[in-house]
Image (cartoon, helix red, strand yellow):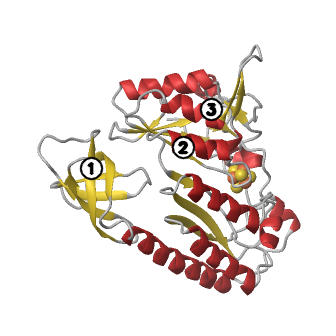
Amino acid sequence: MLIGVLGCMAERLKAKLLEQEKLVDIVVGPDAYRDLPNLIAKADDGEKGINVLLSREETYADISPLRLDSNGIVGFISIMRGCDNMCSFCVVPFTRGRERSRDAYSIVSEASDLYNRGFRDVTLLGQNVDSYKWTSPDETEHVNFAQLLERVALIHPDLRVRFSTSHPKDITDEVLHTMAKYENICKYIHLPVQSGNSRILDLMNRTYDREWYMERVASIYRIIPDCAISSDMIAGFCTETEDEHQDTISMIKYARYSMSYMFFYSERPGTLAAKKLVDDIPEEIKKRRLQEIVDTQMKMSLEVNLLDIGKTFKVLIEGDSRRSDQEFKGRNSQNKMINFPKKDGLQAGEYTWVKVTDATSGSLRGEIVDKP
Ligand code: SF4
């Protein structure tokens, strides 16, 4: 048996795992997976297999398997790796290296292949998809993210296209207009705000301020009125005051997030914040602020979901609901999960129309109806 550690933290833990504690045989950084056969062979011969070099080129284009959900309906394709931003709380720039975009043709052919194998929902993944930028080797063709989205959407109208994550400083109106143009590009944007306060955003090095973010949200709702937006938020970042915390609370109400991932600030070694800022908010205050953020978000999620009662959505059936095999579960374009009683003749992987009859902060309930 060989034991290996793979991924972002491998570089940092290399000395501890290999030398001090002699726990593992193989240590592989996030850009070195192609080297695995060679490293395993080395470890088999009794040497340690180590490769934690970061690359400027590695995108893992054309490596399968892709990340697939076991239901055979929902798949994920990495379109880029790394990140050129330097958010002060984040380890990604140090552990995943510079931004690299994959060949647009190989992404489209992977998505087509998924469609041909029965997949109906594909998510294009990257740390910052809006800065996707690919140039053909002969430099005659340039593809930005809006153009890539369009190419994937054109594969088939029955293939739903999602993407994550968008950076508020980079998401363009061109992307929003492309989303509005194609029914199969899902009307859902994960747009992490992190904080609603401009001074804290500056300390976080997010490179946008509260007004910029609000303008982006207003543009989304103007160009795609039925779009759902979700967010990430950090409570109690370095030096955050009560008033600044309230700016995050008010942003939830302004942006009307359908859901959010919410955390209290926890310093990560090696980040800019760890080097330059003092983590000075006591833990009980961070936790209390986080709870206020969570409570506000839960109320908002319920409020926006209640507005869906009476509406009819096109839903992709993903399988049996968690509670009962008499019910299906599936998501609408806005990424909301809907549970509804089964109907003969329908199965997972097919679309149906569902009228919403009830809602909680986490999901919707409904019943199958005829196409409106
Ligand atoms: S938070 Fe996102 S955008 Fe910022 S550095 Fe990390 S990965 Fe990049």
Image height check: is 153 above or below 165? above
* Numbered circle sitting on residue 372: 1
> Is residue 131 shown left or right of residue 160?
right
Secondary structure beneath dot 2 equals helix
Image height check: is 314 above or below 34? below
* Numbered circle sitting on residue 179: 2
Question: Disc 1 marks which amino acid?
Answer: Pro
Could you tell which of marks 1 and 2 lies nearer the N-terminus?
2
Secondary structure beneath dot 1 equals loop
- Residue situated in front as seen by the camera: 29 or 255: 255
Q: Could you tell me which residue is drawn at 61 percent across and 85 percent down? A: 288
The residue indicated by pointer 3 is: 147
> Is residue 115 shown left or right of residue 191?
left
Q: Residue furthest right?
A: 276
Percent from the top left, x then y, of residue 13? 70, 49
Image height check: is 117 above or below 123? above
> Is residue 106 shown left or right of residue 159?
right
Question: Disc 2 marks which amino acid?
Answer: Met
User: Is label 1 in contact with label 2 (beta carbons under 8 Å)?
Assistant: no
* Number of callouts: 3
> Is residue 280 shown left or right of residue 128?
right
Question: Disc 3 marks which amino acid?
Answer: Gln
